[in-house]
Amino acid sequence: MGSSDRLFNRQRTLHEILGGGQVADLILWRRKNLTMGILLVTLAVWVVFERSGYTLLSLVSNVFLLLIVILFLWAKSAAILNRPAPPLPQLHLSEEMANEVTTFIRTRVNDLLSVSQDIALGKDSRLFLKVAAYLWLISIVGGFTDFLTLAYTSLFIVLTVPAIYERYEEYIDMYILKGYKNLCFLHVKINEKYVSRVHNWILEKKKLS
């Protein structure tokens, strides 16, 4: 597919736009087990919060307390009975993954700060209207759901929509561009049929006055 057949005539692939690293692999299901694990864990957390009434702090504390007690008793009993210790994996965050996550977050935060500065200084009225519309929409959505449900739904969208788009990119771009062309054609027809008439009528009124 050429760049002219893609949305916004972009030159880069979706994987490159998302950073091209492990975060992009995670979002686009290049690491299926990890992505599925994150979705299942967050779903379980959401169900626990919704059904049990736990708060985040109390749930995390209880889970860690239970885990530490089990591992401690297991290790002590294994030492007494000459059994193998608990098979713990190597708990280590690689420098590569930490750098990629940090770079991803830093880039997005800098973009957000740049946009905020432009809006605060009144440099871009169109951008201000877009941001105001998005915040208003978020406010409306927030009125219908709680933060936890919204967070899980957002994570679900982030981990599914880009992957679906990448898989069916050619068809999605084709239909969206086709719809966009139809809207542009409709806009031209409406402009010629109604807006131009109104404009000409206003000009005639001004000439007569």
Image: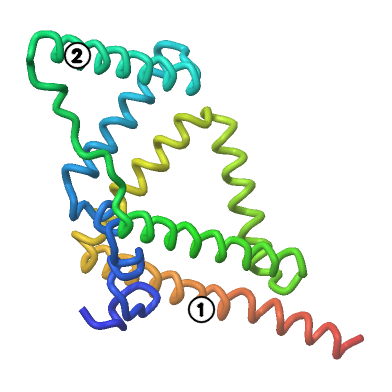
- At mark 1, the secondary structure is helix
Mark 2 residue type: Trp
Mark 1 residue type: Val
Examine the image and state in which quarter residue 203 appears. bottom right
Examine the image and state in which quarter residue 19 appears. bottom left
Q: Nearer the viewer, residue 140 or 156?
A: 156
52 to 142, vertically: above or below: above
Query: Residue 191: horizontal and vertical position, in percent?
Result: 57, 77
Q: Which residue is mark 1?
A: 188
- At mark 2, the secondary structure is helix
Residue drawn 26% across the image and 70% down it: 174
Q: Which residue is mark 2?
A: 74
Q: CB under 8 Å between callouts 1 and 2? A: no
First reached walking from the N terminus: tag 1 or tag 2: 2
Crowd around label 2: few <14 · some 14–19 · many ≥20 (10 Å): some
Q: Nearer the viewer, residue 113 or 91?
A: 91
Q: Quadrant of the N terminus?
A: bottom left
Residue drawn 51% across the image and 78% down it: 188
Q: Nearer the viewer, residue 33 or 58?
A: 58
Q: Give left or right: position of 123 versus 53.
A: right
